[in-house]
Amino acid sequence: MMSVPARHLPDDIAATLRHLQSELDVVPGFEARVAEGKRRFKLRNRKNDVTFRAVRQTLRAMCSGVQRCMYCEDSCGDQVEHFRPKDHYPGLVFAWENFLYACGACNGPGKGVRFPLFRSSEGSAVLMPGVDAPLPPPHGDALLIDPRTEDPMELMELDLVSTFYFVSRYPEGSRQHQRWRYTADILGLNERDALCRQREQKFKLFKLLIEVVAREVEPARRAVQLARSRDLVSQESHQTVWAEMKRQRERHPTLVELFGAVPEALEW
Ligand SMILES: [Zn+2]
């Protein structure tokens, strides 16, 4: 999981979203606003809706690889996901900054409407808004890591040695550690075995793509292979594997050797 590049919506689309949100904001009563927000979002979030076609197009362009899910980076991201769920945050139903593009597995039963927060006045205490709670959730920082507004790689890193799990970069008991644990658990980043195996496969593939460049000694052929490998790497799923290969290269003799032979790859 890595940070998603920022993109602006076209002005008219952004204005329409703001208008939809302002109309929803005046619906009286929190419970009614939640129900109405869900209904109106469902109505608008359709293929033939001009606004949401543009929203989807912009989100697609922000995905890594070939439209990979912004959470797991494995499956196709094709669902507009609300980082802060509609069930608790009717004020963010049409908020552009609250949208991500996610796959069904990440946007489904796992995350659902759960959205625990840190109760800011009580350090690490965690508050879990109830699914049926008809009250607005209290203010507080999210446990779930938001790849649109923060850098997940700051909080966690990939184990490139054996498990290909996301592991915490902070000690147990810290807020950061709790955020890693919650995010990895709720999205199944380490439990979904196929994800870990895919990351391992990408690690092998990315190494091979550098290796084939390193083997070319003739400058023109090397330049061609360099461009080919760069293009292939950039279109693959699991871009975090590539980012971690660069970040952790000093810890792995093979990577020191590969990036030493093809230093240009550090810019990919
Ligand atoms: Zn996913």
Image (cartoon, rainbow, N blue to C red):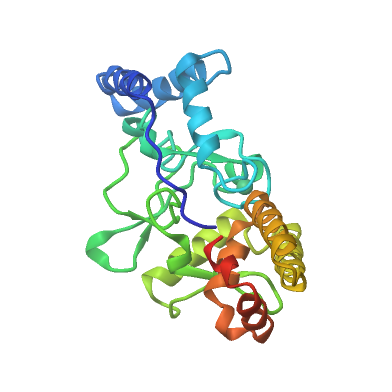
Q: Residue at x 52, y 73 (%)?
A: 247
Q: Residue at x 25, y 60 (%)?
A: 120
- The spot of residue 25 in percent (x, y) is 27, 23
Closer-to-camera residue (192/211): 211
Quarter that holds the C terminus: bottom right
Q: How many marks?
A: 0
The image shows residue 16, relative to residue 128, as above or below, that is above
Closer-to-camera residue (195/192): 195
Closer-to-camera residue (225/162): 225
Quarter that holds the N terminus: bottom right
- The spot of residue 252 in percent (x, y) is 63, 84
The image shows residue 164, relative to residue 88, as above or below, that is below
- The spot of residue 13 in percent (x, y) is 38, 21
The image shows residue 265, relative to residue 85, as above or below, that is below
Closer-to-camera residue (90/73): 73
Q: Is residue 118 left or right of residue 4?
A: left
- The spot of residue 157 in percent (x, y) is 54, 71
Q: Is residue 203 left or right of residue 13?
A: right
**Residue 56 in view of the camera:** yes
Q: Is residue 36 left or right of residue 229?
A: left
Q: Is residue 224 left or right of residue 130?
A: right
The image shows residue 262, relative to residue 86, as above or below, that is below
**Residue 167 in view of the camera:** no
